[in-house]
Image (tube, helix red, strand yellow):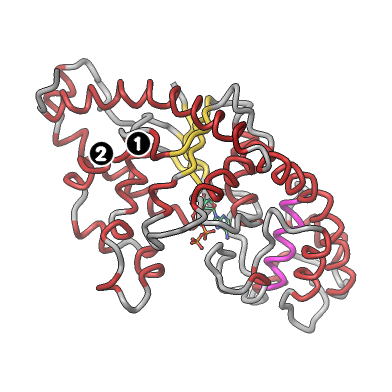
Amino acid sequence: KELVFSGVQPTGNLHLGNYLGAIRRFVALQETYDCIYCVVDMHAITAELYQPDLKNQIREVTAAFIAAGIDPKKQIIFNQSQVSGHAELAWIFNCVARIGWMNRMTQFKEKAGKDRENASLGLYAYPTLMAADILLYRATHVPVGEDQKQHLELTRDVAQKFNNDFAAPIAERGHEDGFFPLTEPLIGGPAARVMSLRDGSKKMSKSDPSDFSRINLTDDADAIAQKIRKAKTDPEPLPSEEAGLAGRPEAENLVGIYAALSDRTKAEVLRDFGNAQFSAFKAALVDLSVEKLGPIGAEMKRLKADAAYIDSVLDEGSGRARAIADRTMAEVKDIVGFVRS
Ligand code: AQP
């Protein structure tokens, strides 16, 4: 059976990249798949351990899921730390994954920076926890931004090695094609990678110290307008064909954002705005962004004011997630050979 799983870290400052690369696609997928969407709070403490506002950050991501249009009655929305199977399976996967695999992970290198010796062990093991998140539900598809592609490949490697190493007990239990699926990433669209508004070579990110680098989902119309007007560009007008965006990362990024928000391709956008000056294009992008993001931001604020409702969604979702997770963990423990009562 096909199942979608994906997660977002509650590290604050949810932005347009998270929306276009992930959350908006979560909404569309619920038409075709059963979906589990997780607020990955255990991942959120890998880089910054003590976050005094963590509870509100968890509620903010939950509010964003619901405000964007995910139906918590139909799909499962929950926070990771309420289902202990994530940590249990991650431990087993720490014993499946090889140090050499982990050493190749580029996100660790980027996030750890120069002072790698001082990064947390959790940050290093992030990809095995992510593999556990996905495989705990034996999910077949994971919608993510392009930055997560390498972690998805590691998830497949972990699944494959587990299936191979435990081939005998897995076959004994009647799983003919292995126990874990080889999960497919769903990456794509004109905004699979939204870049910083200040630097077209860096991805838009929650942790960028400059708030002008990103459009937050809770930004009001004035803030959105100001950030887009100040976004870095080059002095040339827009090209009329997509090939003309090559070597112009800031222009390409803004055109990509416009394309994603208007459900068109970059080529179609350039058909309308080719040869336009950035001032005219940015004005149109402000209007479009405010039209598309304004209602989501307003709904997020409304939902966040009702913490009891948000917590009830997470509680109910956790119960449904736990029921699936417990079945997987019982089988995994039998396959590995642990004694359980
Ligand atoms: N710039 C982006 N463009 C497209 N997709 C993006 N995603 C993140 N940034 C972009 C996608 O959003 C989902 C949730 O990401 P996450 O919160 O789990 O972690 P992240 O990838 O580390 O996100 P950030 O915003 O960049 O946070 P920091 O600054 O903490 O590193 C994922 O599907 C991701 O692909």
- Viewer-proximal residue among 79 and 136: 79
Does 144 appear in magenta? Answer: no
Q: Which amino acid does label 1 sit on?
A: Leu
**In the visual, does 129 lie left or right of 21?**
left
The residue singled out by tag 2 in the image is: 160
Question: Magenta region, mostly helix, strand or loop?
Answer: helix
SS at mark 1? loop
- Viewer-proximal residue among 4 and 291: 291
**In the visual, does 298 lie left or right of 206?**
right
Image location of residue 92, percent across then percent down = 20, 40
Q: Which residue lies furthest to the bottom in this view?
A: 235
Image location of residue 26, percent across then percent down = 59, 38
Determine the residue positioned at 68% across, 72% down.
212
Determine the residue positioned at 29% across, 63% down.
120
Q: Which amino acid does label 2 sit on?
A: Gln
SS at mark 2? helix
Quarter containing the N terminus: top left
Determine the residue positioned at 52% across, 55% down.
53
The residue singled out by tag 1 in the image is: 182
Does 252 appear in magenta? Answer: yes
What numbered label is drawn on residue 234?
Answer: none
The image quadrant that residue 113 belongs to is bottom left
Which callout, 1 or 2, points at the residue further toward the start of the chain? 2
- As displayed, is residue 326 above or below residue 6? above
Q: Do the residues labelled 1 and 2 touch (CB within 8 Å)?
A: yes
Quarter containing the C terminus: top left
Tally of numbered tags = 2
Determine the residue positioned at 32% across, 40% down.
132
Label 1 crowding class (10 Å Cα cut-off): few <14, some 14-19, many 20+?
A: many
Residue range of the region highlighted in magenta in the rendering:
250-261
